[in-house]
Image (spheres, rainbow, N blue to C red):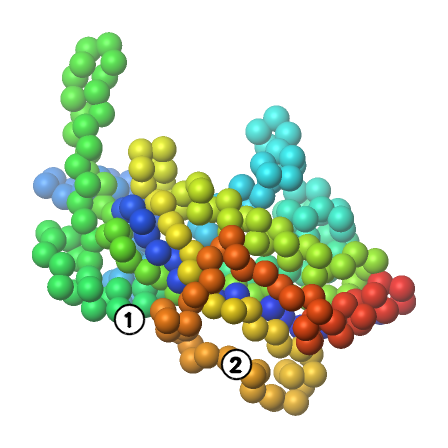
């Protein structure tokens, strides 16, 4: 019998080590303005990192790392033992056999300290910088100037991931969680957003200790022990992506493992 076991909560900060550009899809440029603007929250006008951008980058990195890219095509087999499809989802056109997508990636908004720092920056743009670039025609040497809007180096965004653990088949969802960590570690040595080959989008992750919320916790309305206020303050984000681990011998993971085993045998 398929059943929900619990959630693993991963929270922390995304730090921009270089300027970040996640475009808003603007097709036209303004005279004297920027040619490519960043996406912003319509309510606050703050730049943010869409969950779709972060998850898409994690998926692309994981596809290559697990050998799932064939002839340059996006992977989507939807097989139960595929870490990419099980963890990050598959196309709606595929017959999914392993239950819901395990990883939920929320939009990442700037933390309070970043907003305060943005408000002190002198820039012709709102909370961002204008990066001027010159593209040269290699045949004629004609210059093609272009201005890109970027989120400022040093900005931090609140990271919020939820990994759902289910007993739906013989496969262990807790084992597949390692692929989430692999994608996050790969991200730090890759980049987020556009123009990455020109130095944009280098990020570092600062993670808080993982939190475990069981089905019983949700049913009883219990407050999870050690759950920090939301969003998590910077001083609580002490773990790097490389050092982040799940202790399988601690509760509730030990009980979850037994329940997952029972579910797979049902």
Q: Position of residue 86 (x, y in %)?
A: 68, 53
- What residue lies at 63% left-to-right and 54% top-to-bottom? 178
- What residue lies at 36% left-to-right and 69% top-to-bottom? 234
For the residues carrying marks 1 and 2, which lies nearer the camera in this image?
2
- What residue lies at 32% left-to-right and 41% top-to-bottom? 200
Indicate the secondary structure of the residue bearing disc 2.
loop
Q: Is residue 119 above or below residue 189?
A: below
Pointer 2 local density, CA inside 10 Å: few below 14, some 14–19, many at least 20: few
**Marking on residue 226:** 2
Drawn side of residue 228 relative to residue 78, left or right: left
Quadrant of the snapshot with the C terminus: bottom right
Q: Tell me which label, 1 or 2, sits earlier in the chain.
A: 1
Q: Is residue 222 above or below residue 198?
A: below
Q: Is residue 116 above or below residue 86?
A: below
Quadrant of the snapshot with the N terminus: bottom right
Residue 90 or residue 180, whichever sits in front:
180
| Residue 92 visible in the snapshot | no
Q: Position of residue 126 (x, y in %)?
A: 17, 57
**Marking on residue 199:** none
| Residue 174 visible in the snapshot | yes
- Residue under numbered circle 1: 112
In three-dimensional space, the C-alpha distance between marks 1 and 2, rounded to whole angstroms, equals 22 Å
- What residue lies at 70% left-to-right and 83% top-to-bottom? 216
Residue 137, by quadrant, is top left
């Amino acid at each position: 019998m398929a059943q929900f076991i619990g959630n693993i909560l991963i929270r922390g900060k995304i730090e921009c080590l270089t300027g970040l550009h996640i475009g808003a899809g603007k097709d036209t440029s303004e005279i004297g303005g920027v040619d490519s603007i960043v996406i912003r929250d319509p309510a606050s006008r703050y730049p943010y990192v869409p969950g779709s951008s972060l998850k898409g980058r994690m998926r692309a990195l994981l596809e290559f790392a697990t050998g799932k890219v064939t002839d340059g095509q996006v992977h989507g087999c939807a097989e139960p033992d595929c870490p990419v499809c099980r963890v990050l989802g598959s196309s709606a056109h595929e017959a999914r056999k392993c239950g819901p997508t395990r990883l939920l990636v929320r939009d990442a908004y700037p933390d309070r300290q970043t907003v305060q720092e943005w408000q002190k920056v002198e820039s012709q743009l709102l909370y961002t910088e204008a990066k001027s670039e010159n593209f040269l025609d290699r045949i004629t040497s004609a210059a093609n100037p272009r201005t890109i809007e970027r989120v400022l180096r040093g900005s931090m965004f609140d990271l919020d991931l939820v990994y759902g653990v289910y007993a739906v088949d013989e496969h262990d969802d807790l084992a597949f969680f390692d692929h989430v960590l692999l994608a996050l570690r790969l991200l730090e040595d890759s980049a987020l957003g556009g123009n990455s080959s020109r130095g944009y989008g280098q990020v570092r992750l600062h993670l808080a200790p993982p939190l475990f919320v069981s089905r019983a916790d949700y049913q009883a309305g219990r407050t999870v022990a050690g759950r920090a206020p939301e969003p998590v303050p910077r001083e609580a984000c002490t773990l790097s992506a490389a050092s982040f681990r799940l202790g399988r011998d601690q509760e509730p993971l030990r009980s979850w493992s037994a329940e997952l085993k029972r579910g797979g045998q049902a």
